[in-house]
Amino acid sequence: MSLAGMTSKPWIWAWAAAALAFAATLVLTQGRGAGELAYAALSFGAFAAIVGLGQMLVITLGPGNVDLSIPATMTLAATLALKFMGSDPGTALPGLAIALAVGLGVGAANFALIFLLRLPPIIATLAASLIYQSLAIWSNRGLRIKPPTGLAEFATGRFLGLPNVAWVGLALALMVWVLLERSLWGRWLLASGQNLRAARLAGVPVEAVRAATYLAVAVFAALAGYLLASFSGGAALNMGAEYLLMSIAVVVIGGSSIAGGNSNVPGVWGAALFMFLVVSMLNSYGAAAGVRNVLTGTIIIAIVIAASSRRARI
Amino acid sequence: MNRYRILLPVVSLAVLLGLTFWMQPRAMSYFGVNLLFNLAVPIALATVAQMFIIMVNDIDLSIGAFVSLAACVTATWLNDAPLIGLLAMAALILAYAGMGAVIHALELPAIVVTLGMSFVWGGLALFLLPTPGGAAPEWLRAIMKVKPPLVPMAVVAALLIAGVTHLLVIRAGLGTVLRGVGGNPRALTRAGWNVMQLKALAYAGAGLFGVLAGMALVGLTTAADANIALRYTLLSIAGVILGGGEFTGGKVSPVGAVIGALTLTLAASFLSFMRLSPDWQIGAQGAILILVLTARLIFARRGETT
Amino acid sequence: DKRIALSNNYAGNSWRQAMLSTFQETADQAVADGIVAAADAYTTSENQPTEQAAQIQNMILQGYDAIVLNAASPTALNGAVKEACDAGLVVVSFDGIVTEPCAWRIAVDFAAMGKEEIDYLATRLPDGGNLLEIRGLAGVFVDDEISKGIHAGVAEHDKFDIVGSVHGDWAQDVAQKAVAGILPSLPEVVGVATQGGDGYGVAQAFAAAGRDTPLIVLGNRQDELKWWAEQRDANGYETLSLSIAPGVASLAFWVSQQILDGKEVPKDLTVPFLKITQADLDATLASTPEGSVANTVYTLEDAQAVIEAAE
Amino acid sequence: MSGTETGPVVVELTNAAKHFGPVRALDGVSLRVHPGDCVGLVGHNGAGKSTLVNLVNGALAPTGGSVTFPGGTDGVRAVFQELSLCPNLTVAENLRVSHPGLTGLRWRRAARAEIGASLDRVFPDHGIDVDAPVDTLSIAQRQMVEIAIGFAPRAGQARLVILDEPTSALDAGIAEQLLAHVRRFCAAGGAVIFISHMMGEIFSVANRIVVLKDGRSVAERPAAEFTRQGLVDAMGHVVTAAAAAAARAAPGEIVIEAEGLNARRGEIVGLSGLAGHGQAAALARIYLARTSGWRTAGPSRSKQTANAVFVAGDRGRDGVFPLWSILRNVSISVLGRDARAGVVNRRAERTLAEDWRRRIGIRTDNLDNPLLSLSGGNQQKVLFARALASDAEVVIMDDPMRGVDVGTKQDVYAMIRAEAAKGRTFLWYSTETEEVCQCDRVFVFRNGTISAELTGADITEEKILEASFEMQDALPQVVPA
Ligand SMILES: Nc1ncnc2c1ncn2[C@@H]1O[C@H](COP(=O)(O)OP(=O)(O)OP(=O)(O)O)[C@@H](O)[C@H]1O
Ligand SMILES: Nc1ncnc2c1ncn2[C@@H]1O[C@H](COP(=O)(O)OP(=O)(O)OP(=O)(O)O)[C@@H](O)[C@H]1O
Ligand SMILES: [Mg+2]
Ligand SMILES: [Mg+2]
């Protein structure tokens, strides 16, 4: 691919920024710890990537579509799954089933609010997330139960040198990519995101597409919650908090159009790595919290400007 | 539909107020009403700020962080050196206008830029006040504690905000043109308007009301903290929608937005008067939000059939 | 016939949940015994001073006689607290205290806690070395106080050097992520000063990076204690754990009851933090529910003792 | 270049050109407009008419040549092909947008009076409430408002009004009011550039006709020197003579019975009446009732559930997917048929699209170009291709020929007749009598209900108009859609 062709891909910018942050950290250590840092970025980036893929599908549905219940869904799914497993060996799969079922339930509830009550998705998912949060508190009062050993080992383990959670994230990314690029459902989603009314009039089953999308984002969030709790040694009531803004940020930094109808799978991964690496870089340079925030915000805006002005020129 | 747009917020506020008074008759007094609503004043101002952005088809994820920053400036510079403080406030408003211009000129998605800016505002607030503190200027405290005859300050302030913004946005010619930006920016370009300037103006309006929200908040709390108003981002969006606004098409109602802010504040109080179990107090807030918005459905159906 | 309310700003972690349940137990018993007429707990849906200020104002309207307050901000609630005092309510703040002079404060000396961590590290690591500091939530008063204490300690013991500082937001997963990100750029780290709620995540991050586990000062969470016991059994690991006990809510409850009862109580009270040493570990671990926090429940007598000590 | 006129000039284009990259939208056109002129501008879809308008209006800067206004640009107005009102504002507020001079506390009152007067002047008995938000008006009413704003004084005097396909959403009666006003306006010394694909209108108002073809002016003469056929020839279209030649199959059983109308297999059923009397809404309801938002149409089980497809007239709102290529826009409705296990069959997709590009003559060299690179008329052909490529038995068309040029229209008529002969049923709403006359049977709408059913020889302009108005002296009352 030519250089011009490369720069026309909006996801390039997220990857370039991630590489830059990576390099800047290594400058400080004079090259030490490159492997460690990459490994950590892949581990923690995986969680952001998984929720980001879900959020991307929703944002692809068009303006106004966004899921703000991701953190609460992660917490609820992880809480219920870990409570069920109660550190007992051999319960990992039923626990996973419970987490995914929670995801389906949450997605169905969110979509019911949006479809039946016609609430704007922003408000519907925000309001519903408060209810999920209550459910999580009520179900086990914030006790941090350890995952079964086997599951914890899987979540923190590696395969062929890459973290297992990153493999999961990569597999999901591949799946979403195939879905969007090759499948009927992906075409329908992209059409609905560009013009919902035209899609309905062109025979696209738009309600089914919307429902499936809201189910998908919740299932992805539930899975991320389950993995994160297993990875970090238990579910906490506030475990999803940082993934609210994170999930939106990785989608837009990754080059997907916030106006819908256009999505970008590789960009989500690039942005997920970037979001981890930039904080690591600033921490390594000893930036205080204030500086860190200002720089993070500035860099996010800079990436978005770079990505968009490129696109306009082509 | 237009007439119903404002009817729903009014009705939901009235019903909620009735229920609150029935449950807590003590609230039905000059003192009580002021306590119920005084913290809604900064929220109403922030909601109006958000409305300026939603009016031009954008959404502002940074207003909470911005109000926090404005509060920190108020409690530090404005208190210690009023002139510098005022200059800083003007700079903040200009920064908002610049943000609007950049968003338009580079065709950036506002949601992303404001997301990034929320980090920037938050970081600046941490610079200014690494630990909670500062103090409200005396005059500001005096304004927020004033006790007008018959009607408490909170109500007077809400009426004032609603009235002024209604004049600015709905009645004034320029406000009408600004709403047009949300309706069809292309039409404005064709009519010879510089849409970038108009957007900058709308953002400056948001910045102005954001700054006012920060000041009002500090006047009530007497001190600031870098995280003081983060919650306003989502509250203000909910308030605009509750007040009959829509995310696209320049359909907003300033009076509705103020009522929306009052309703949200009242809803939280109403729940605490219900003395739910702590487990469910959080969820009940979500439930009541859903309930109030569901009423929109009924009104929307009514609107369709006319 | 007096009514007391708990105003709480956050319920999203095990410490707060333990605090809420301790308060509830103490309060229910007191109501059953006829000592007070009612004692209700309220939690805001977001950890925000604005919401908590509204909550306090509602408590005034609800006619409570006293408010037991764990504040979201030491200063931003002063307006509402002043209103409550003016309306004749007793306000007792604890853990997250408020600076408004009309309120009582049951404070933990957080700076001293931070300093004690370094003092302990100095006794264990006489040669000094590199330290990693895990901070809490940026912009929050407790975070700043503990951090000040830690830095004061390091200034005193100049063999120590803080080579890295990250915000772990008092959460295991956030701390784990932040530490994993900074570790590659750090030289060897011999000790970690934490603020509580983050030690287990730090240990996980060190293990994942394949580094030797440094001396981590822990924060009384059950998973931290359990990990400590496992390490001790495996390789004789020894450390210290300290934090404020969630049961301080019950102390605040009794203090407010005493004030309502007409006792003269000084405005500033201090409680010691709950410290767990190698010797206490097994006993504490046995008495702490799985996934919770080590706790001490205060009785009326404890409260009277604390009050007397302050006079 | 017409060097014959003399006297003052309102606007002069000298060799004006506008290129969009390789696309020569306008390729050196010279034109002079004098006060009192009514220039008719015609040309096939994509000839460059709208581009010329944008150069005169100043919305685009020419890439070559010049556009000059000897008397300044004051009083130069344009009514664009796509609606350019703010839907959330009222009619009067929209005047404020175009007229920044309306200031002061009482601007609203002045705006109401001014737009009301202008509407009364151009469209007597328009029945439009100047305080109604524009989004509560029908498309025809919006177009009327826009035209009225174009002719409003706005603190001066309109000197040149450019009307780009102003009648495409108007029914015949209202269009006639506009033509009458244009004649009065020009007689009083105003200048108009009038763009339309309807030859009758051009001959009715224009004193001079300019023919654009592929961005060049190929003919410019007084209107009287053109004949209808001569004009069409100049535009470069070969009108397909095959008109009614296709053999008509005898209509079969009834496949649609809804909204008070019915249609048989193989029939072309027209919906007519004044614009905005409920035809579009009825069509949308029929379509939505036969399809579901939850599943795609499978093979039809009974005649009442015969599959339906929709051809939108309001492309931007109802038809196009703006981010997509032409290929994807064509194939979206039929993907489900060819997909295996939920995977798009991309070879079948391309074959089908290539086939339809040839059959319907979409002007592009590459189906992977963005849809928006096509001219309006060619985009409309894409929507036809999308619908006709499907297996649906019922084709529902909501005024699908908006802005389509004469030649293309003839092609599409022939195609519709051929498809009907194969057993497809067409429901066709149109604002143009010429199209309605292509139908086998016509239902005329009035106030949201059917007021007449016409067949065969009864389908005439007179009969339709008669059924459109309640009584002889009743006024065209336009009801919001
Ligand atoms: N954005 C674009 N990018 C590239 N080419 C374009 C673009 N827009 C239009 N074109 C090309 O310019 C030509 C003229 O388009 P235009 O929309 O002006 O046609 P038109 O005369 O309005 O036709 P119609 O009557 O079909 O609407 C088209 O053939 C198209 O290929
Ligand atoms: N912004 C643009 N970018 C690229 N090409 C353009 C653009 N605008 C117009 N064109 C092309 O310029 C040509 C002339 O378009 P124009 O809109 O003037 O046609 P038109 O004669 O008005 O057609 P119609 O009768 O369909 O309205 C078209 O081929 C169109 O595709
Ligand atoms: Mg045109
Ligand atoms: Mg065109």
Image (cartoon, coloured by chain):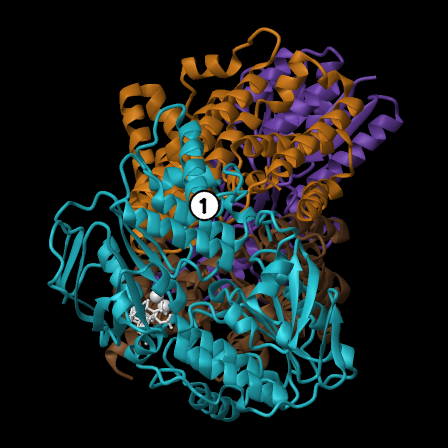
Chain colours: A brown, B orange, C purple, D cyan
Give the side of residue B68 with respect to residue C264, left or right: left
Inspect this view and state whether residue C152 appears.
no
Crowding at label 1, few (<14), some or many (≥20) Cα neighbours within 10 Å?
many
Quarter holding residue A175:
bottom right
Count of marks placed on residues: 1
Q: Residue C287: percent from the left, percent from the top?
A: 75, 48
Above or below: residue D328 compared with residue B283: below
Chain letter belonging to callout 1? B
Can residue A274 be seen here? The reply is yes
Q: In x, y percent, where is residue A114?
A: 66, 56
Which residue is at the front of the view, A281 or C130? A281
Q: Is residue D188 above or below residue C51?
A: below
Mark 1 near ligand 2 (CB under 8 Å)?
Answer: no
Is C159 situated left or right of D436 in this image? left
Under tag 1, what secondary structure? loop
Identify the residue shown where x is 34% and y is 47%: D184
Q: Please tell me whether residue D161 is drawn above or below residue D465 in the rendered image.
A: above
Q: Quadrant of the N terminus of chain A?
A: bottom left
| Residue drawn at point x = 72 percent, y = 64 percent | A102
**Which image quadrant shows ligand 3?**
bottom left
Task: Choose between D413 and A182: the one closer to the eye.
Answer: D413
Question: Would residue D247 appear left or right of A283 to someone viewing this image?
Answer: right
Front-most of residues B4 and C108: B4
> Which residue is outermost to the top?
B149
Amino acid under label 1? Answer: Asp
Residue that badge 1 annotates: B60
Q: Position of residue B124 (x, y in %)?
A: 35, 39
The residue lying at 61 percent from left, 49 percent from top is A126
Q: Measuring 56% from the left and 15% from the top, which residue is drawn there?
A: B153
Q: Position of residue D418 (x, y in %)?
A: 56, 89
Quadrant in the picture for the C terminus of chain A: bottom left
